[in-house]
Image (cartoon, grey):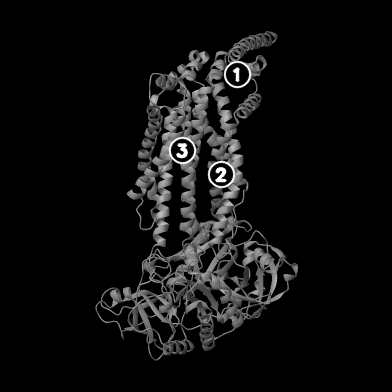
Amino acid sequence: MKIFFGRRKQREAELNEELEGHLRVAASDRVQHGENRKQAEQSARAEFGNVTLVRDVTRDTWGWRWLSDFLEDTRFGLRVLRKNPGFTAVAVLTLALGIGANTAIFSLIDALMLKSLPVQNPQELVVLQWSARHKPEFRSSMSYGDCDSEFGTENPRSCSFSSPFYDELRATHSDLFSGLTAAAGEAELDLSGNGPASIAHGRIVAGNYFDVLGVRPALGRMLQASDDSLSAAPVAVLNYGYWQSAFGGSPSVVGKTVTFNGVPTTIVGVAEQRFVSLTPGNVADAWLPVSLQPRILPYWDPQQNRADSIWMVIIARLKPEVSREKAAAAVNLLFRNHMLHGEKPFSKEADDPRVQLLSAQNGLVGERTNFSTPLYILMLAVGIILAIACANVAGLTLARAAARQKEMALRLALGAGRWRIARQLLTESILLSAFGGALGVVIAYWGAHAILKFVAGSSSRPLGFEATLDPRVLLFTAGISLLSGIVFGLAHAARGSRVDLTPALKDATGSAAAAGRARGGWFNLGNSLVIAQVALTIVVLAGAGLLVRTLQNLRNIDPGFDTHNIVNFGVDLRLAGYKGAQADIAVGDLQKRLSAIPGVTSVSYSSIELLTNGLWTTSFKNPGSAGPPDFDSNMLQVGPDFFSTMKMPLRTGRDFVPADFAAASAAAAADVSSASPATPVSAAAEPAGSAAPLPAIVNDIFVRKYFGNVNPLGRRVSYAESPGEAEGKRKNPGLVVVGVVGDAKYDNLRREVNPTVYVPSSGGNVNFELRTAISSSSIIPAVRNVVSAFNDNLPIFYIRPESESIDQLLFTERLIARLSSLFGALALVLACVGLYGLLSYEVTRRTHEIGIRMALGAARRNVLAMIVGQGMVLTAVGVVLGVAAAMGVTRYLSSVLFEVHADDPITLFAVAIFLLLVALAACYVPARRATHVDPMVALRNE
């Protein structure tokens, strides 16, 4: 042992003496170049490291503890980074942008897609979903956006079930579930008794809803099973956020009585803060028991309690000992019997109706369907950004490697192993990525909240989720930071550990340059990294260009009516106590008052605001010989002067007259089976039965598709028979066509115009359209004053200009277009920085060569062309490779594009030309610096 340590100390002494000799030589060289002795010694030690470097070598040689080596590597790496603040700042900022962008998008994906449901033991919760080969013969079907539903004729599916099936399941299968509950749709609530009248969004749930979910109160109590009976007093539980915003977070809210839709309701509690919604994005301000529906919902139809009406989402909690497969088999047997062998079968054996139990985490999709595609597209974009950032920093470190060749050579000469050198350089790279990750967390926090602010500004409802830097997000950041450090550090470590000792120790710039050119020429690692950055930038820019063009194409669509200078807002007079003909009279009175506002040129109303994803469809019998016997058509109730207000051209026939609205009001009063047009579902529903057909106006495509060349005026259109229609109901005479208008978009700009029937409006739930001669936003205060003066208990829904409605409709397209453009610009900047850095390094490395060229008579323009040419050749190669890659990658954007192909040549050509021009500017700066090299100074330095 003594011999071992004696030899070790002798080796350390020898290496220390050898290193001091190299340092003295280096210091003497610096003195000859004008530095004083003390500064020269300090500079030499800073360049080659302190004598502790020798201890690093001997520790590696004799196998000392890895932790001690790691700490020494870290300390030395920090010293090196501190000595080069410019390089460190650029590298850290570059990595921070790449890591921060990835973390920001991942935090949104985590909040919306990955975070567990805010309930007790969410893994035990399941949601029921049925499917069939053909559409069952339900009288009505409702969906609330909780699940992935499809009500088409072929392969329909839904999470909605009938009330009788829910009751039967509760009664027969308590052995499978520790709890079974249900939720229905939203209820628009006219809230009074808490300041000015306002709209609250309620959710109808079973009394045991919160017990099954395991949600606790933040204040008071939750709903109970005893609250869900017709004899129970009306009660409600508030959302925590709504309690804070609408009631100021006052504890006295418990026990307070407010009025919801004219029904005095006692607030019994506030839900815990973490429970915003069971379904992502479907946020309710208050929860009310199912038993309140007949009293609180003016459009409630008692027939919805029949087996042929599906409207309840069933949620169950499995018993710990029951597997999902076993429970699904039992529930499926009950459902098939209900569908095939009930009092009235709704499906045939060949339709194969069945039920599956989905985990609530995955089955309750909500707003995920709207955000998942944009988020995954953006995740791909920021992943490319991170790759560009890593390539950029790798290029910068390789450029620095030339300046550190003498240091690496000296280490190798003193006995350090190549793996030891590589480990030190890799440690420096990981330190850079760690600093970049730390700064990236700050950028991610700001970026995620900026994105959410944009999304919230385009939504009329609370989002119900927020991006937080929870442990999963921070672990993701740490992971990509470490991976980034390894990725861009490998090139540096490999280059640094393969230094040629003889030319490096001579410290000859010309020799180093020659060696550098010999290691690959044009196809060296530095050039390859620049080409890769340019290619990846082309991919990001091409995607951004396609998405921007999609947004522009959607904005340029002619919807069939004039969207300028229109203000929309909704009111539901039924919520304020108006009923039947009284509501129709009130709507007409309000229309006259709104028409008197200065600057308003025309006022009308409709049952649904156009271009807001609201849609009402009705089944009709085909009036012609072509096509199927029954068909679905869009339907919209409209008020007087609707077509002139919206500037929809009347092709032939007449507009609606007062007698038409009187007939519609009388028909509504006699209705025994009509469905509310406000219900956002497809159903075989129709206006009420009456002795004479109601007048209707159809669009051009309706005429072309079902009447052909026959004059449609005066032709009858009959409703298809509704499955499960009550016996003894008076036969509905249908509609008679009195006019034809031009085609217009209904619910969505992307959707093709379908056959549409317009009928006279009846009922108090309407959306007003005001055509103005001045700025539409400027009359909003006057509109509020008129409505308040008309009835101060009448709240307004979503008052906004039509342009804002379209912006909300296109918010997904606007989100991904803006963010992809931002990321494209970031990729462009990083690629140009990488190109600039490479050429700057080339100019520095080739200073002697440039000096000789200019001394021999080379013109400045030739030197300029040489440097710019090198950069543009690299850029051109990257552009060619990038265009080829973009043609493959952008195919995955096809589902979100509109009227532009994924391989659109115009977009690819424009992106390529733009990048070449920007790259030319990036090449010019270092090239211009090369033309100002003084030949005498360059030769003297050599």
Check disc 3 and report its element: helix, strand or loop. helix
Residue at left 58%, top 25%?
Answer: 424
Disc 2 to disc 3, C-alpha distance: 20 Å
Question: For residue 118, what is the image quadrant?
Answer: bottom right
**Numbered label attached to residue 48:** 1
Pointer 3 residue: 832
Q: Is residue 827 visible?
A: yes
- Whole-percent x, y for residue 286 in the image: 63, 69
Residue 484 against residue 361 in the figure, above or below: above
> Is 630 situated left or right of 788 in this image?
left
> Is 127 situated left or right of 471 in this image?
left
**Numbered label attached to residue 498:** none
Please name whichever residue, 48 or 616, is drawn nearer the observer in this view of the structure.
48
Which of the two marks, 1 or 3, is nearer to us in this view? 3
Residue 915 against residue 359 in the figure, above or below: above
- Under mark 2, the amino acid is Gly
- Whole-percent x, y for residue 942 in the image: 49, 16
Check disc 2 and report its element: helix, strand or loop. helix
- Under mark 1, the amino acid is Phe
Residue lying farthest to the right in this orientation = 252
- Whole-percent x, y for residue 642 in the image: 43, 79
Pointer 2 residue: 100
